[in-house]
Image: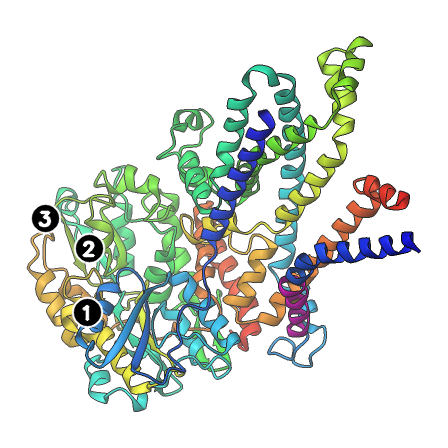
């Protein structure tokens, strides 16, 4: 009886703690999604008979496939770079933690402080041969004009560079934090068994922070899939039209706010949402990220 | 200790990121509640930074009767914000300074933002515009007032022309011949890797890029002879290096060509003189060199047509609480001569441009009075490129990107026009050849 009561109290407490989040979730996620879903199937110029015409319209739009290809190629470059560099640098930071880690952590974080529009301006000046301090280096490779660098073929690399530098620093510090959770005795035991720093990093530390890295990968992928600011600003300021409708989110924006077609825009956004939900479900059910929590729940 | 620092760093970074993210988004609704207030008369005006002084001046002049709020809103954001207001059913500005193409969207029944000005603006005002306000004429009614005209003229450097013994071309064939004489001299006949190629060549030639026949029909045809003759005439000039395929605003072009006084001539809009050619941080051409001539004529045309690059408009909201107040504000902002006298753009309203021309005409910066050519071209803006409901401004960026990347003018134009052919049906147009 007593046990039953405490279980009930636990459930009530749990619900109360979840409530503020639930309210926000309903207000800013569930309601907009329902609204979007209803707008996407309303009748409109491009969806005269209602229903799922807007979804088909988006899939057949001439800008859709190029945007899918752009974002996919961007992710192919951006994700592995993030994973390898973040894991590598946080392990390095952890290894030399005694002496230099504070200034180093700061150094990693500083580029992350320059985000959005400012980062784009900074990178524009870094990459534009007329202004860049690296202009002599570019000239060695025959890159003397702005359009030698800012052209459609290079956009994927430029955006990967921008997003990497604005995002990597934060994640390095976070993964450094996750490395702190490894018990010292474990590392000591490894050392006693004769493991050198490299082996400790690769064989002990890396497997232990694997799930945090996977978690990072999913969040970074969600952000990358929704890339918007970088291409939008480049093509609305310095190089008009260069990266117009380059990403899926840009296309959604264009459809809604330049094409007066909210239905198609919501259809595209919902399709992106489906992809994102699938990714989230994969993390929950296909990785061991939540295993510990599940076990604890089972125990209770 | 380390952990403390880590957490404080984490918090600091989160705050930084949060602040940046917060700064990036803007309040889409604005602060307009003009549609509902029952108290004193109010007006909300959206302007860009250049037009803000005009709004402030109006604010002062009517302060006793109407509380005018001037909000600076980026030109790129205006259409999105008005579409959002339409969705929300509130938040519209009463008067807005807008990019020219948007009027066709605002005037369309499904959008309904633009007020039909016929009943609210004195016909004498429209008459004084002469033909300059025809851009705003949709289905027989005026839906906007032109702020300025961005008619193209032929800008040329008199010093270079004298040095090489060149004469100012009056036909496009002469233009090409003159340009070819620059081969090997380091001088160029301008940059075309931007909207200038559309406004200065395709449009004056009559290439049907946005040739609106009626509310549901538009003619877009890259195979029209008015398009192909542009490729045929201009491509050899690009190939010979006498026309630069970069943008006139390209940092490299500015420092390597324009600022070295290597631009012998360049077809460009009327606002280039004060905004592009003269400023020290732009082309920085010294005093006494530049002049403007009338546009060269295309073969077989009876008129030396211009295109337009820019030329903003004032749109009055059909949702304004007091429509006449809003329309009066629109008229003042679009036409007041004192407000336009010292601006870089050529006023669309004739009484205003007379005052403007009187100032610029005696400016010793120019080798000769540039306003003569501008006035001549003001009534020659070719009428078969019109405001359309598809995103013309954005797609012109496609044209620029293609030309900058080294694609031929023909391929670039075809790619650009193909995107228009794809877009037009989605906003209710049937495309014809």
Number of the front mark, 2 or 3: 2
Does A2 appear in magenta? no
Query: For the point 58% across and 35% down, which residue is it?
Result: A170
Q: How many neighbours does mark 2 have within 10 angstroms: few (below 14), some (14-19), or many (20 or more)?
A: some
Number of the front mark, 2 or 1: 1
Which of the chains bears the disc numbered 2? B
Q: Is residue B338 left or right of residue B82?
A: left
**Residue linked to disc 1:** B57
Which of the chains bears the disc numbered 3? B
B123 versus B263 height, above or below: below
Q: Earlier in the sequence, mark 2 or mark 3?
A: 2
x, y (%) of residue B351?
Answer: 14, 76
Q: Label 2 to label 1, Cα distance in Å?
A: 23 Å
**Residue linked to disc 2:** B274
Q: Nearer the viewer, residue B401 or B145?
A: B145
**Residue linked to disc 3:** B288
Please provide the residue range marked out in magenta.
Answer: A26-40
Q: How many neighbours does mark 3 have within 10 angstroms: few (below 14), some (14-19), or many (20 or more)?
A: some
x, y (%) of residue A13?
Answer: 76, 55
Q: Residue furthest bottom?
A: B119
Q: Nearer the viewer, residue B297 or B357?
A: B357
Q: Is residue B156 left or right of residue A224?
A: left
When asked about the image quadrant of residue A123, the answer is top left
Q: Are marks 2 and 3 in contact (CB under 8 Å)?
A: no
Which of the chains bears the disc numbered 1? B
Q: Is residue B204 visible?
A: yes
Quarter in which the C terminus of chain A is drawn: top right
């Amino acid at each position: 009886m007593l046990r039953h009561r405490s279980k009930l109290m636990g459930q009530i407490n749990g619900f109360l703690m979840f409530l503020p989040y639930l309210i926000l979730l309903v207000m800013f996620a569930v309601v907009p999604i329902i609204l979007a879903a209803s707008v996407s199937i309303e009748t409109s110029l491009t969806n005269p008979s209602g229903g799922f015409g807007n979804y088909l319209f988006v899939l057949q739009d001439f800008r859709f496939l190029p945007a899918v290809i752009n974002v996919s190629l961007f992710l192919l470059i951006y994700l592995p770079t993030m994973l390898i560099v973040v894991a590598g640098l946080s392990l390095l930071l952890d290894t030399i933690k005694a002496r230099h880690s504070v200034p180093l952590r700061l150094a990693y974080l500083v580029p992350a402080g320059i985000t959005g529009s400012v980062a784009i301006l900074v990178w524009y000046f870094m990459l534009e041969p007329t202004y860049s301090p690296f202009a002599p280096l570019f000239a060695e490779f025959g890159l003397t004009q702005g359009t030698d660098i800012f052209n459609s073929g290079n956009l994927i690399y430029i955006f990967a560079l921008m997003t990497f530098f604005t995002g990597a620093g934060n994640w390095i510090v976070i993964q450094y934090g996750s490395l702190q959770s490894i018990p010292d005795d474990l590392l000591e035991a490894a050392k006693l068994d004769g493991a050198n720093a490299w082996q400790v990093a690769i064989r002990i530390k890396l497997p232990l922070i694997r799930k945090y890295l996977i978690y990072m990968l999913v969040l970074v992928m969600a952000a990358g899939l929704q890339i918007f600011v970088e291409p939008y600003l480049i093509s609305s300021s310095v190089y008009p039209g260069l990266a117009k409708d380059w990403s899926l989110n840009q296309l959604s924006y264009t459809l809604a706010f330049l094409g007066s077609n909210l239905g198609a825009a919501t259809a595209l956004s919902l399709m992106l949402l489906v992809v994102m939900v699938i990714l989230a479900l994969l993390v929950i059910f296909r990785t061991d990220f939540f295993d510990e929590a599940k076990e604890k729940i089972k125990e209770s | 200790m380390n952990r403390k620092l880590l957490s404080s760093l984490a918090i600091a970074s989160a705050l930084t990121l949060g602040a940046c993210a917060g700064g990036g988004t803007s309040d889409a609704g604005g602060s307009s509640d003009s549609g509902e207030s029952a108290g004193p008369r109010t007006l909300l005006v959206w302007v860009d930074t250049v037009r803000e002084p005009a709004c402030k001046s109006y604010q002062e002049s009517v302060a006793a009767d109407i509380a005018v709020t001037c909000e600076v809103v980026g030109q790129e954001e205006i259409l999105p914000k008005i579409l959002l207001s339409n969705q929300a059913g509130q938040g519209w500005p009463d008067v807005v300074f807008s990019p020219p193409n948007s009027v066709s969207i605002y005037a369309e029944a499904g959008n309904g933002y633009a007020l039909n000005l016929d009943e609210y603006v004195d016909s004498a005002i429209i008459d004084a515009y002469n033909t300059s306000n025809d851009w705003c004429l949709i289905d027989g009614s005026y839906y906007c007032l032109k702020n300025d005209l961005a008619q193209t003229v032929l800008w040329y450097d008199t010093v270079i022309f004298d040095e090489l013994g060149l004469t100012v071309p009056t036909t496009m064939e002469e233009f090409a011949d003159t340009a070819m004489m620059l081969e090997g001299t380091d001088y160029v006949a301008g940059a075309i890797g931007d909207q200038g190629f559309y406004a200065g060549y395709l449009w004056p030639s009559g290439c049907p890029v946005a040739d609106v026949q009626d509310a549901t029909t538009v003619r877009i045809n890259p195979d029209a002879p008015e398009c192909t003759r542009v490729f045929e005439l201009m491509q050899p000039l690009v190939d010979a290096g006498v026309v630069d395929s970069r943008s006139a605003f390209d940092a490299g072009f500015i420092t390597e060509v324009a600022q070295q006084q290597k631009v012998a001539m360049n077809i460009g809009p009327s606002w280039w003189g004060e905004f592009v050619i003269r400023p020290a941080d732009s082309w920085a051409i010294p005093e006494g060199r530049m002049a403007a001539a009338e546009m060269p004529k295309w073969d077989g045309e009876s008129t030396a047509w211009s295109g337009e690059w820019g030329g903003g408009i004032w749109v009055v909201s059909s949702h304004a609480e007091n429509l006449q107040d809003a329309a009066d504000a629109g008229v003042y902002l679009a036409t007041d001569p004192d407000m336009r006298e010292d601006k870089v753009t050529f006023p669309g309203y004739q009484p205003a441009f007379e005052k403007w021309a009187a100032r610029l005409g005696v400016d010793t910066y120019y080798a000769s009075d540039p306003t003569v050519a501008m006035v001549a071209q003001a009534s020659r803006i070719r009428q078969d490129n019109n405001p359309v409901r598809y995103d013309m401004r954005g797609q012109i960026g496609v044209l620029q990107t293609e030309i900058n990347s080294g694609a031929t003018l023909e391929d670039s134009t075809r790619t650009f026009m193909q995107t228009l052919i794809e877009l037009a049906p989605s906003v209710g147009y049937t495309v014809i050849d």
